[in-house]
Structures are given as structure tokens and as C-alpha cells.
Amino acid sequence: MVLLTLIKLAVFCFLRQVRERLKEDVEQMKLKNPNFSVLRLPTCFQILHSITEVNENSSVHGLIVQLPLDSVHEINTEKITNAVAPEKDVDGLTSINAGKLSRGDLGDCFIPCTPNGCMDAKRFLESHQAGKWNISYTALNLQKPVPSDIVISRSCAAKSIDSLAREVGLLSDEVELYGKTKAKVQLTIIKRLQSRPDGKYVVVTGITPTPLGEGKSTTTIGLAQAMGAHMKLNVFACVRQPSQGPTFGIKGGAAGGGYSQVIPMEEFNLHLTGDIHAITAANNLVAAAIDARIFHEATQSDKALYNRLVPLSGRERKFSPIQINRLKKLGIEKTEPSALTEEEINHFARLDIDPSSVTWQRVLDTNDRFLRKITIGQSPTEKGYTREAQFDITVASEIMAVLALTSSLEDMRQRLAKMVVATSRRGDPITTEDLGVSGALTVLMKDAIKPNLMQTLEGTPVFVHAGPFANIAHGNSSILADKIALKLVGPEGFVVTEAGFGADIGMEKFFNIKCRYSGLRPHVVVLVATIRALKMHGGGPTVSSPLLNSHFVAIGCSLKQIENAKHFGVPVVVAVNAFKTDTDAELDLVCTMAKAAGAFDAVRCSHWAEGGAGAVALGEAVQKASSAPSNFKFLYDLDLPIADKIRIIAQKIYGADDIELLAEAQHKVALYTKQGFANLPICMAKTHLSLSHEAEKKGVPKGFILPIRDIRASVGAGFLFPLVGTMPTIPGLPTRPCFYDIDLDPETEQVNGLF
């Protein structure tokens, strides 16, 4: 106690000397500079802001607040000193460090004065390994039998999202909070972390699924929980935002399941932060602009059209910046509206869209089969200008694909401008930039481009961003989320991202489309398999029937999808997602045959029932595989003709003998080649329930020809997508949709029945 008293006395004397010196310094400044004014001294708010910046700066390990804080402004000294992070409090003046000091707890606090503080900065560096997160994990309270997903989700006390953000190295001004459990992350973090090495990159895919899915999302989350909460590695999961179509339709939520979930699952599965609504609004603005332009061009002379497109502002007409861009595209180097010739006015004002060539559809985030073909323009006010059209589901919109594949706000603006919506009667592609709407689209999407931060049941971080369907789009979460996560985890950490549906669809597009644009190269493929799916594809009954006969497994265990993954030269780890009805013999047989088929490893997982603890073996296998040799390569060269690229995918991935281009597809091949789009990658729109184009053909079909009925161009997103068979682009509702079970408790405001 005598020692502590002497220390306190020394601190008091030291601070009194500092105050006196500071007063002397102020007086000297006044003598030297008559213009010196204490009014220039900072306010309390400014000091607190500066302290927060230092607290969050990992390159600064200690902070001294020089007292007294003389100012004409009111300064709360206690508030200032306590704002310093205790682990950076070199002078030991925060209430936490002072309390520990007074108790004699000298081993876990900063001891005044500065020399001891510098020694403790060394302790800080030793306890905070470079790149290692100081993160707390949430312990699970496992129940048997496993309760419903929503009961489990509500039983877990989630960390505040701002706390999680700090734990993973995000600064306060890089995070926009959406309540207590969601946040958006500013893209400025990319520049701040640009020199940090990336972590290891893992993609989770699956075998050809049953209609109920095989647990890729659950495995993605379970693996992240295992590597984080149990293996103590920096790890981020990156998943897609689910469409509300399946949520209220047949599939239910997509937050994972059991004890491997993103929480809160209601927030995850419903509106989240409104990104899908922003895409719906942007997409339908384009659709409205197309039909309005066709209508106005059809009902006005060149002069009237031009005068309305470039209206008088005061006493003069003036082109908008986006109209200047159109003039340049047309080769018209004029900026004065009155200077255009009649021919130039005609070219500028008339897009001359061929209504039959419009490929841009309206969208809705709802399963509605009756919108697959509609007639628009039937009101008398549209003067008989009708045409057949359709709705797609929002997640099939090209704007969703643009969001998922963009690398920056500037890149998104350019991609949105390049989106082709129709063809002119002269055969020229018509873009959103030609319509004058691309700038407005960027405004609608300016918040949606920021990844959404959430967490798993065990407190590991998750980015939820973008949600393109895998059967009618490219089926992967955003490049931006993956890139930011790879920087945050650091070189020893892992990012686990998910590719939709089976490896023949989501994984193939992940490699050939997403990796081309991101420049990222995955270290490991995790292939999720289930006994029930292998039995069904091996000739067993449908998933609604009991699956008991082991010989079905042996037949279905050819695991063509391992071969598909190996086409890209990346090590494959098979995760056998165990169900309670599976036998040990069945699980062991699948693991044995997977290794024989070329997998780096194959392990059984029980993360649905046990959380991260049930996927530790998978995490260890992935960690080992990430250090194994790999020889990544794309499946095809972009310079090949369109038909050849489609044929390579059909033959190597699906196992088809050949392809057949139907009449409309042949026309599109010729058109897109002429328009300069032939060098884009291919995004096949195909059923996810079979390797072939026929959903009822299970296993590994042989001897089939893949029919291509049409091809569409997503030029802004950067791919061509052939339509295989009769694949609908908006799902329908089943006889008994999931919405029968969903309701709201008006007293607690809790959502019930959402799985």
C-alpha cells in the first residue's frame, strides 16, 4: 500500500507540473504571437472524435492525454480520459486502469507514468498478434431433439453489430448501423487495407441436389463457426441475400439451419437492409423508360421530341451530361443544342427501338407464375401501343448480377450504363445510357453496393451481399464482400463463400465468371453431399419417401461433381452432411468412394445438430487442403465462338454428347457476334435438379443433346446466358406455400412460422 500511495503522489505531482508548464507555454505563445487565441483550441467533441480515431488505429499502441485540457470551451476531463481505450491508456488515467491500480492488480493495467506505459505497449503487442482478431465467441446451448431454426435463432443472444465490427477490425466511420444486428460496410475500407495480404479463399458447392436442398448454406455457416469459434482462426462467411420468393414459396429461409445459422434469421430472410427492393426499383425504372420512349417516339415528330428531350431552361436549351455522352457515342462533337442539324436531331432523339427486340423485363421478388407472360399497354391512354412482355423474379435481374460482379462504385456506374435492353431497327444495341437512365440507376443502387454485416450463432462474422439465382443467373454473393473479407481476415485467415445449387451450376459460374472478374483464385472447393441425394440420384425413391437401401448409395456415389471441380485444378474436400437417418456404413462408404474419386479428403459433418463443433474435422481438412498444390485454370477461352463455349460446358460439366441451337438461339449468336459481345463468358440458365436439361433425369445422364432455345445478353454484368429447355425465369407458388405458416405476434412483434 505504501508503494501505491507513493505512485499516486508521484502522478499527482507530475500532473501539477504539467499544468503549470502548459500555462507558461500559453503565455509565451501570446507574447510571441499577438494573434494567438485559445479560441482555436479544440472542443470536447473534437477531442473525443480524435481519441476514437486513435483507439481504432491498430498501428498506434499507446495514447497520452496531456492534462490539463485548457480551453475556453467546456471540457469534461473525466469523459476525455475515460474515452481512451484501456489497452492504449499509457498514463493509466481511465477509470478501469485506475481501479486496477488501486486494487494492486499491476499485471493487467497500465502503470503511470510514461516509461511504464511504453513497457506496457510492448505487452499490448505481445497479446495482440499481428492480424489476429480479439474476438469473443458465443457459446451454444445445444438441445436434443434439435428445435426449429427460428427457436434456435431466438435462443441466442446476438452481440451488438458495432461490437462485432470492432472485433474484426472495422473502424466506426466504416460502418453504417441498421439497428442492433445489421450494418453496412463502407467501401473506403478497401483503400485502407489495400496493402494487407489476402486470406485463404474457400468456395462451398454441392452435388446435384434434391428439391429440398442439401445444406450448402448450413455447411458454409457451420464451417465458419468451426474455424472461428473452435479453431480460433480469423474467418468470414460470405453468403447471398435470399429472395422472398422461395421464403414464402416452397424452400423457406436460407440462413442455414439448426445450430449453424446467420442470425437474426427473420432479418436475414426478409427485407434485410433493402438491397433487393433497391434492385426492383432500379430494374423497373429501366422497364418504364423503355416503353415510355417507344410510346413518345411513336407519337411525336422529330422536332417535338427533341424540344421535350432538351427543354428550355430560362431562355436557353442545355444538354444534360448523359445526353452529351450520347452525342459523343453518335460522333456528334457539339454541345450547343441549337447547333445540331436536322439529321443529327433525328439520330439523337430517336432510339428507334424495335419493340419485338426488347429483352429487358419487369421484376418482382415474389413467386408468381401468372406473370410469366403478360400484355402491357392495354389502357386507352396508351393509344393501342401494346406488346407482350413478362416478369422475372428480382434476383434474376441483370442489376442484381451487376451488384454481385462489380468492384467499385465507379465500376458499377459503368456496368449499369452498358446494360443492353433492346436492339434498334438498324440492328444497334440500345443501352440504359442511351435511355438516359443509368445515372439514376446508380443513385438508386448507391447504398445497395455496400456489403451487409451480420453474425452466426457462435458470433463469427458474415457478409450477406447480393443474391443472384444460380439456375437463372450466376448464383454467387458479391465480389466486393469476398474482397473486403479476405483483407479483414489477413493472410492466415479464411473466407468461406458459397456458390448456389450444384457444382455443375453455381461452382462452374463461380470459376468461369466470378473469378474472371474478381481476379481471385480459390484455395479449396468444399463439395457438400448427403446420403439422401446420392440415393435419389442412384435410382432411389423421391425425398418424400424413407431412404433405407444402402445399395442406392453405391450406385449414386459416382460423384460426377468431384470430376467437375477437378476440371479447375483446385483441391476438393467432400463434406458429407449427416442426417439422423443415415447409417455409419453409408457415411463411411461415401467418404471412401469420394477419396477414390479424387477428393483431397472426405469427412462427415454434424454441424446442423452440433454447430461449429460438428464441423471441426471439416475445418481441419480445409486448412490442410489450402496448403496443397493447386493448378487453377478456366474451363474455356473467352475468344472461342459462342457456340463452342456453350458446347464445352455441356460436354465437360453436364456430360452431354452435344448441343442443339434452336432457331432463336442461332439468331442471337449471329446478332451478339455482330454487336461485339461474342467474347463474354457464358452463364447457363438450366434446371438445378439434374445434370441434363430434364429435371427428372437423375444420376449422371448419358447420350443426351442439350437444347438451347434462346440466348440473352447481360452486357453490363458481363456474360451471355443461354436458356436451356423450358427454364422459367420466375418461379410459381406450390399448392401449399410456406406462407400458410407465417404470422406475426402483435404483442411481441415476433415472426412465427419462418422455419
Image: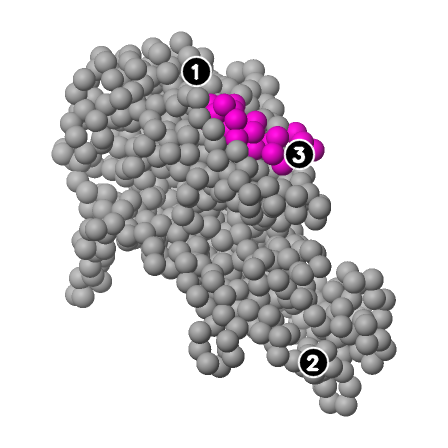
Part of the protein shown in magenta: 637-659
Residue bearing mark 3: 641
Q: How many marks?
A: 3
Q: Earlier in the sequence, mark 1 or mark 2?
A: 2
Q: Is residue 645 left or right of residue 657?
A: right
Q: How far apart, in angstroms, are the residues tagged by discs 1 and 2?
A: 67 Å
Quarter of the picture containing the N terminus is top left
Q: Quadrant of residue 244?
A: bottom left
Rendering coords of residue 235 (x, y %): 45, 34
Quick one: SS at disc 2? loop
> Which of 388/546 is in front?
388
At mark 3, the secondary structure is loop
Which residue corresponds to mark 1?
599
The numbered disc on residue 222 is none
Frontmost residue, 349 versus 266: 349
Q: Residues within 10 Å of mark 3 (few under 14, many from 20)?
A: some
Cα separation, mark 2 vs mark 3, equals: 42 Å
